Image (cartoon, helix red, strand yellow):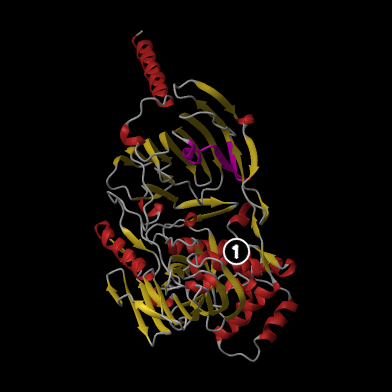
Amino acid sequence: MRLLFLLLISLAFSATSQKDLTQSLLLPAKLTENADAIVRTHDLEVNLLSKREVQVYRKVMITVLNKAGNKHVWDFIYYDNSIKVKKAEAYIYDAFGKEIKKFKKKDFKDRSAVDGGTLYSDSRYLYADYTPVSYPYTFEISYETSSENTLSLPFMLFVNSYNLSVEKSSLKVHYNSTELKLNHKGKNLEGYQIEKTEFPGTLAYTVKDISALVNEDFSPTFMEMAPQVHLAPTAFYYEGVSGEAANWNELGKWFYDNLISGRDKVSNQTLAEVQALVAQVDDKLERAKLIYEYVQQNTRYISVQVGIGGVQPIEAYEVDKVKYGDCKGLTNYTKSLLDAVGVPSYYAHVEAGNVQVDFEEDFASIAQGNHVILAIPNETGYTWIDCTSQVHPFGFIGDFTDNRNVLIMKPEGGEIVKTTAYTNHDNFRKTNADYSIDESGTLKAKVEITNQGIPYDQRFVLEKLTKEELHQFYVKIWPNINNLSLLNTSFENNKEQIRFEEMVELEARNYAAVNGNRLFLSVNAFNNSNFVPSRYRNRKSSVKLLRGFLFEDEYTVSLPQNYQIEAFPDNVSIDTKFGTYTMELLANDDHTITYSRKLLIKEGEYPKEDYEAFRDFFRDISNSDNAKIVLNKKES
């Protein structure tokens, strides 16, 4: 009788707790502030039964407060040929906690998880399709998956977006401690209410009451701030291949021995072609450049992600035959051709994207990467190439894979190294202009712009644009020039020096404002900044400048003959920890002036207490860039 009584009490408590989570009328103010949605509970349970069997259970319940919160709803379940969805269900509740819709597994829609750029993929997802009619509402999903592949385990992100708060989030991991060892790493856990339990066979984290993070200008990336725990088994199985690895050296060697080695054969015809191509070239980097350009001209990128192909490259012979491949296949193919002409190179796993994400040096997990590039040894380190690009110059990787820790895979093992960094002065843009202003305020100009480093990466695509696309581009980058008409454009893409030159002739009516006998002219026509970072009453994050830049501008301006200079801005010189700025304006006579500007932005991370000074720096730049000279019409 006592046991029955305790069971009834437990069930009643569970039902009450569930009801508290499904209703959304009484929510803590701490969790609603800055939040579009609230995670009421997020439970992730990982059961690593053996090195070749893992079961994952996940339950997520989210209260959506407004329309913007819909993007936070976890309404999908990813799977492929190796991940089986065993159970799935979802529920929607109104503000009072009343169930208004229910999904069983058969009610979920089934979609491909890739876009049209992927030729083959078995990646799919189940999707609970629901369109809300009122707010707030609560969405609950729970599912269970199983897989034989244990090379990559799910990681726990306790809060996964800005403007999303968390009431409770938990991670539980169970594993056979006599047969398996689990590596794990927590990041950004300081300052949160966290309970951690760990003993052989079990790892558990519980986090409560996480207030919503706000995306602030020039903050570190979300992943650099969000609390998270990563998992990696030291013994694993992947698509028929077993392995053991406790560090990057061992993981890189397993990868090389099992997934790369022996996949380097190409046709005799191709071997003869590439060997003839480099026959008169002794320098290994020059040979590598010729091979890279050969691959660019003779292959194209298409994503292929099926089974072991999601990690293992397609054999070089297959790429050679069909003339296409994904990043893994094209990298392995290029590596094979380099081997054939006596140039060593290494397959490299990287987290690609214009935000720099490092591999964790003390935590080996293949789940950290999403792309593959090639490292070619040189006298000082490595020359890097992205074999999927048909347009980038040899040795230039741009902002997609720059300045980040990656894993290179050698026959003797894996090694963490950093890719090329384009810093401060490397990222250079020089603008030279000769322009005139007539008495109606019309501007006529010839502009030459030189781009190097990351600015090269941003601009070299211009040579492929149509006339209309070019007009739209220059209207966008010169928003201060109204009525812009492009008269002529030409470009020079110097791939040897990795420099891109723009030559632009243009005209713009009413650039200078006419007021009676006066003309008001903003001299900085082509690199004019109005940007001032947002103000925050209580800044939470540090200030981070991901990449530095150097901009130099030299203009010669011809003024109307029947006008004279009435007012002239003072020269400006600013020196801060974030960068430097100088502006010099010189009147050669009443009819010509010379404008010089130099802006250096320094990459780096600074404490949040420096943010106001940082804002002041950009506000001072904007004030100087928009300062006007006043011209007065001469008396007859």
Q: Nearer the viewer, residue 181 or 588?
A: 588
Residue 294: x %, y % from top left: 66, 78
As drawn, 617 above or below 280: above
Q: Secondary structure at mark 1?
A: helix
In the rendered structure, does residue 35 fall within the stretch colored magenta?
no
- Specify whether 286 is left or right of 539: right
Residue 568: x %, y % from top left: 33, 76
The residues colored magenta run 67-85
Which residue is most to the front? 636
Visible residue check, residue 162: yes
The quarter of the rendered structure image containing the N terminus is: top left
The quarter of the picture where residue 80 lies is top right
Would you name the residue on which mark 1 appears? 328
The quarter of the picture where residue 601 lies is bottom left
Residue 85: x %, y % from top left: 58, 37
The quarter of the rendered structure image containing the C terminus is: bottom left
In the rendered structure, does residue 77 fall within the stretch colored magenta?
yes
The quarter of the picture where residue 132 lies is top right
Count neighbours of disc 1 (C-alpha within 10 A) and say few if under 14, some if 14 to 19, many if 20 or more: many
